[in-house]
Image: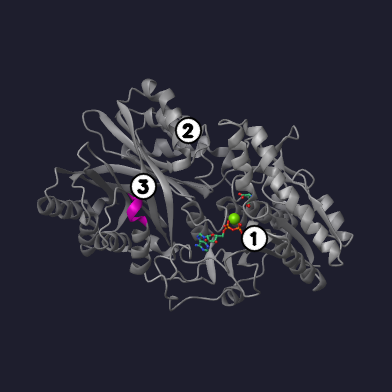
Amino acid sequence: MSLIVQKFGGTSVADVEKIRAAARKAIRAQRQGHRVVMVVSAMGKNTDTLLDLASQVGDNPPAREMDMLLSTGEQVSVALVAMAIHELGAKATSLTGGQIGMKTDNSYSKARIQSISTERIERLLDQGNIVVAAGFQGIDDDLNITTLGRGGSDTTAVALAAVLGADACEIYTDVDGVYTTDPRKLPEARRVEVISYDEMLELASLGAGVMHSRSIEFAKKFGVPIHVRSSFSDTEGTMIVAEAESTTQPVSGAAMTADEARVTVLGVPDVPGKSLQIFSAIAARKIAVDMVVQNVGKDGRADISFTVPRGELKSTLQALDQVIAAVGAEGVTHDDQVSKVSVVGLNMATQTNVASRMFRALSDAGVNIQMITTSEIKISTLVPKDQAANALRAVHEAFQLHHRPDDAKSWKQIKADRGATDVETLVNRLRADALEALTLTGITLTKDQARVTLHGVPDRPGIAADVFEMIGEAKIFVDMIVQGYDGEDGSTSVSLTVEKKDLKRAMEVAESIRAKHGLRDIQGADNIAKVTVSGIGLRSHTHVATLLFDRLATDQINVEMINTSELQVNAVIDAAKAVEATEGLRKTFAESLR
Ligand code: ADP
Ligand code: ASP
Ligand code: MG
């Protein structure tokens, strides 16, 4: 008998009528012959209300008590949903996180799932019940109640679907699917029929709040197909699966996080081990750092800039306060009036001119780019907060995201192209694993890389667009791009990596840009290599970057450039030390490598 997991978000159970509608959906699925597990969020904005209550009691509530409080929201809704199902004439039992055996670690408010015992759920299903499980919560080894982080009910649902070997995992929400960008921010956004795990992972961690990014880590790891759809209609929504909608379209979605903060640590001594000290202090607080940009050092010192969610700025600055003297840095600056605008696409890795199209669109819209980072399937830019909405619209338009690509495939076509998967083996394998443990798939070395750096890029729109258009015209393939702060005058430096054989031509382009825009200086280096750690969930496992920095620092290897995504961490280092670095990292990560 097939099994379906149906998750209902806050707005989908916001009042009694909606609770009844959710109950009817589950009963209908049961009557169609499925075994049904529901995962339910707190009603409406109840979690926010609870947070607000706590803040009225004090500024620094103990983390344990906070989770105790927040978990009550879901407990209310599962009971009401189960009552509604009874009222409508079917059998249901509600269960808390503890009762479904959702074991987590003890990091309150960001707990990770370790194991789920399925016996009780299966027994209840066998007895003809609809099981109504509380989302977002678990228990640690000491039976303390933990929560998974805001939006975490998605992760409960996908994790349950994985361990139960469910045939479908349906996420019922207040939109009818995943759009090319948040339809509330941009009405012209288009609903996509299919999106790949990798794209959704990046979009979710870059601001597409429709799915909790950790739920997609689960789905990818265990091959769970997710159907995101409206709880207020019966239309088909979006399938999140391994495949992408199109095989040619370079960008498939755009996302914005309005509330970011930029932090710059000034004058960090340019010796191995300094980044480690800085980022491990922040990672210890489980803060996910993004857009890390280190200036290519001058006078033996470098500035290190990065972004954090604005809500984590205070905690980040406190962490830095404690290490800044030990690091020997000259100071810290920050800006909390910035937003991050990103584009994501599985096919951009193999296409040129994607970056230049984005930068030109921003420049034409008069948006000044303050920082840039890229990884294999995303480009992120940091822009002034008051220009962010404009920036999002401009990039959405530039990549024609409102049009369905000509080669777009439907889920039906994709499914037909696939062979059958062996669900049984998959389920057995994953029952033996620590569920949310770090999974790495490889540590690789790319040799024969070169770097070009432009120093003193003036603080005005259009220069990044010029640089990458000219590089593209010269048919040079650019791998990593970073732009970050260069000096007190607001100027930035732009570094990019190319293949060694293209360095001479790339330097010629850089020289013409220098002359045209009056840059301070250009620099080239051909003695670099790139080491790549690949896996799933590399950003949310904040210790990955720490371990990487630690290994490289121990081996006295300096990191020149770094980028991080959900899928990879890349570090550019001295070519002479590349083999040693790769071997060292393989040892460090031996346990997580599959
Ligand atoms: P739920 O309470 O059901 O979990 P959420 O509020 O967490 O719902 O997620 C749904 C919301 O996500 C939508 O109302 C929409 O505004 C927002 N959203 C952000 N990015 C996207 C996107 N790319 N596609 C669809 N919705 C998005
Ligand atoms: N109720 C929690 C929240 O509002 C979890 C969830 O809805 O996914 O974040
Ligand atoms: Mg949600």
Image vertical order of residue 424 relative to residue 484, above or below = below
Q: Nearer the viewer, residue 57 or 137?
A: 57
Residue 337 x/y as whole percent: 36, 45
Which comes sooner in the sequence, label 2 or label 1? 1
Q: Is mark 1 within 8 Å of ligand 3?
A: no
Give the amino acid type for the residue marked by disc 2 in the picture: Ser
Image vertical order of residue 450 relative to residue 407, above or below = above
**Badge 2 is on which residue?**
315
Look at the image and tell me in which quarter the N terminus lies.
Answer: bottom right
Q: Are marks 1 and 3 in contact (CB under 8 Å)?
A: no
Residue 534 x/y as whole percent: 49, 48
Q: Nearer the viewer, residue 555 or 367?
A: 367
How dense is the environment of label 3, judged by Cα within 10 Å: few (below 14), some, or many (20 and up)? many
Which element type, helix, strand or loop, lies under badge 1?
loop
Is residue 557 shown left or right of residue 420?
Answer: left
Give the amino acid type for the residue marked by disc 1 in the picture: Val
Which element type, helix, strand or loop, lies under badge 2?
helix
**Badge 1 is on which residue?**
224
Which comes sooner in the sequence, label 2 or label 3? 2
**Badge 3 is on which residue?**
338
As drawn, the residue found furthest toward the right would be 127
| Magenta region, residue range | 383-388
